[in-house]
Image (cartoon, rainbow, N blue to C red):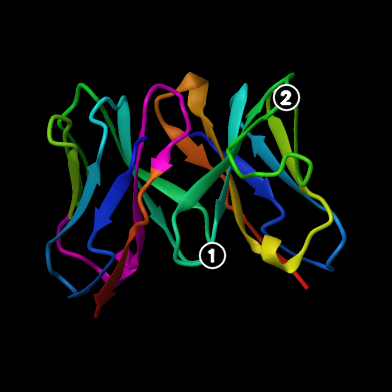
Amino acid sequence: GAVVSQHPSRVICKSGTSVKIECRSLDFQATTMFWYRQFPKQSLMLMATSNEGSKATYEQGVEKDKFLINHASLTLSTLTVTSAHPEDSSFYICSAFLDRGPEAFFGQGTRLTVV
Amino acid sequence: KQEVTQIPAALSVPEGENLVLNCSFTDSAIYNLQWFRQDPGKGLTSLLLIQSSQREQTSGRLNASLDKSSGRSTLYIAASQPGDSATYLCAVTVGNTPLVFGKGTRLSVIA
């Protein structure tokens, strides 16, 4: 099946630094990718929709200047958490539809810990 | 606004039991419903996808049904095994819009 690869799987950073998370579609092109955030024992909450060649669409309450999304190619979207703080510690996961759907595939997720 | 609810939130069963996980959604105008499995600290693995024109899908010991009119889906797991222990998530979508997830059911299968 289609594969979405996310890197890194785990990262620990100091408060105030920035962290970049990559999401790649390995065997298909994804014009749209989705970034989710998951707190412990909670469901996945959509943060933003990443669109290749254009600006990302952010969900209400998500700071676009803090969570920078770049979708520079048809197989890569990046999420950069800028000036990270401990409250940004969470599980971040990306998703894409194979050939515009209908099945969604997810990356392995990134566990971010800000200390 | 679409909302997805999963019941129960947690379930513990002895090995070998058949079990049913429930998912309900508030807006029946969905295109697809997808069941996922998530192991602790891991990403999501797609288990079954049911398109709006379908009523059920089967894969091995898993069977998922969809009743759009009532806004419900069930995931049936036959002859449960300890390896089935995980969180099971239900999600719905309209077209290629982002999936809306339930909070999941944490399943523990006791050997």
The residue at the far bottom in this view is B111
Compared to residue B9, the image places residue A61 above or below, namely above
Magenta run includes residue B92: yes
Q: Residue at x 30, y 35 (%)?
A: B33
Q: Residue at x 72, y 55 (%)?
A: A8
Residue under circle 2?
A: A55
Mark 1 to mark 2 CA distance (whole Å) = 30 Å
What x and y, as percent, mark residue A36?
A: 56, 46
Query: Relative to the observer, which residue lies in front, A86 or A3?
Result: A86
Compared to residue B6, the image places residue A48 above or below, namely above
Subunit that carries the residue with mark 1: B
Query: Relative to the observer, which residue lies in front, A24 or B33?
Result: B33
Q: Residue at x 87, y 59 (%)?
A: A17
**Crowdedness near tag 2: few (<14), some (14–19) or many (≥20) residues, C-alpha within 10 Å:** few
In the picture, the disc for residue A69 is: none
Which amino acid type is shown beneath numbered disc 1? Gly
Q: Which residues are magenta?
A: B77-100
Residue B19, quarter of the rendered image: bottom left
Element marked by disc 2: loop
Residue B47, quarter of the rendered image: top left
Element marked by disc 1: loop
Residue under circle 1?
A: B41
The residue at the far front in this view is A61
Q: Residue at x 63, y 43 (%)?
A: A5
Q: Nearer the viewer, mark 1 or mark 2?
A: 2
- Answer left or right for B44 relative to B36: right
Is there CB contact under 8 Å for labels 1 and 2?
Answer: no
What x and y, as percent, mark residue B106?
A: 33, 66
Which amino acid type is shown beneath numbered disc 2? Lys
Subunit that carries the residue with mark 2: A
Magenta run includes residue B34: no
What x and y, as percent, mark residue A113?
A: 71, 67
